[in-house]
Amino acid sequence: MTDPLFSVLFPVRNELDSLTVTVPFLNQISEFPIEILIIVDDAEDTSLLLQHNTKVRLDNVRFLVNHNSGVFGAISHGVSMSNGEYLIVCAADELLPLVDFNTFCNRLLEGYDLVSATRYRKGGNRHGGNRWGRTLSRFANWLIFRLMGAKLSDATTGYKGFRKDVWGRISEGGAGLGWSCALKFSLNADKYSLRVSEVPVISVDRAFGGKSTFNLFLWTISYLKVLLYKI
């Protein structure tokens, strides 16, 4: 395998159906040498069954077991085990945002420290998923962008790319429930005056089955903790 320029991280929990689609699609569209790291919380995760799928290209795929459970732990473990100079974090259950994968790569190569998807500006949009979750996300991002003056219009999206050498700064204080770490990454980019760029994407939550781990109450508390710390 050619040394990868980009490491793509998929923090997952029982996402076999989604990965069966997203991994081949990503390999097909990528214009750059990539490695794909699939990070699970335990050895019983159904995502690991992809290893036995002979119809999916797996020569550039590695499967990792996260020793610190949760999304942030999975991303951290993936970063520590990655070989690429640049890293891109993706959600396995969302295919359409990957259409813009090469745009992410090119923005990073242009010198941006953090590249983030936006579902709420510049033609981006979001469909599907939990109605209350969508409402919470839109309101939170409006609040962060309009009232707090954040650089990113979609600070909570998990679809983010960054240079490995800025990981220590964007990950600072990132431990929390679910994908709240993505919000922390965005706020840290502001804190450290990193150069950021947004790529509009069309997001369709959970297009290929599986079960979401979203919990409105618990995730709201986790996001609020991040915001209150910022304020």
Image (cartoon, helix red, strand yellow):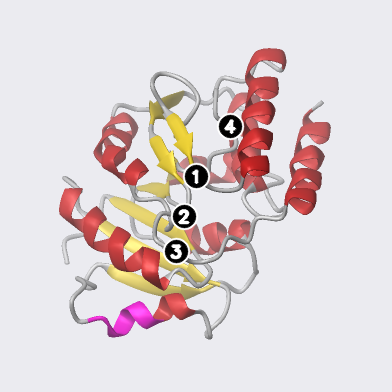
Mark 3, residues whose alpha carbon is within 10 Å: few (<14), some, or many (≥20)?
few
The disc label shown at residue 220, or none: none
Answer whether residue 3 is visible to the viewer in this image: yes
Q: Label 3 vs label 4: CA separation?
A: 26 Å
Contact flag, marks 3 and 2 (Cβ < 8 Å): yes
- Secondary structure found at label 4: loop
- Secondary structure found at label 3: loop
Mark 2, residues whose alpha carbon is within 10 Å: few (<14), some, or many (≥20)?
some
Q: Label 3 vs label 2: CA separation?
A: 6 Å
Q: Which residues are magenta?
A: 49-53
Disc 4: which residue:
155
Question: Does 66 sit above or below residue 52?
Answer: above
Q: Earlier in the sequence, mark 4 or mark 2?
A: 4
Q: Is residue 65 left or right of residue 72?
A: left
Disc 3: which residue:
209
Q: Earlier in the sequence, mark 1 or mark 2?
A: 1
Q: Earlier in the sequence, mark 3 or mark 4?
A: 4
Frontmost residue, 183 versus 221: 221
Residue ID at (68%, 41%) = 132
- Secondary structure found at label 2: loop
Q: Quadrant of residue 201?
A: top left
Disc 1: which residue:
128
Q: Label 1 vs label 2: CA separation?
A: 7 Å
Mark 1, residues whose alpha carbon is within 10 Å: few (<14), some, or many (≥20)?
few
Question: Does 65 sit above or below residue 52?
Answer: above
Amino acid on which disc 3 is placed:
Gly
Frontmost residue, 38 versus 141: 141
Disc 2: which residue:
206
Return the x and y of residue 178 as percentages of the image width and height: 65, 55
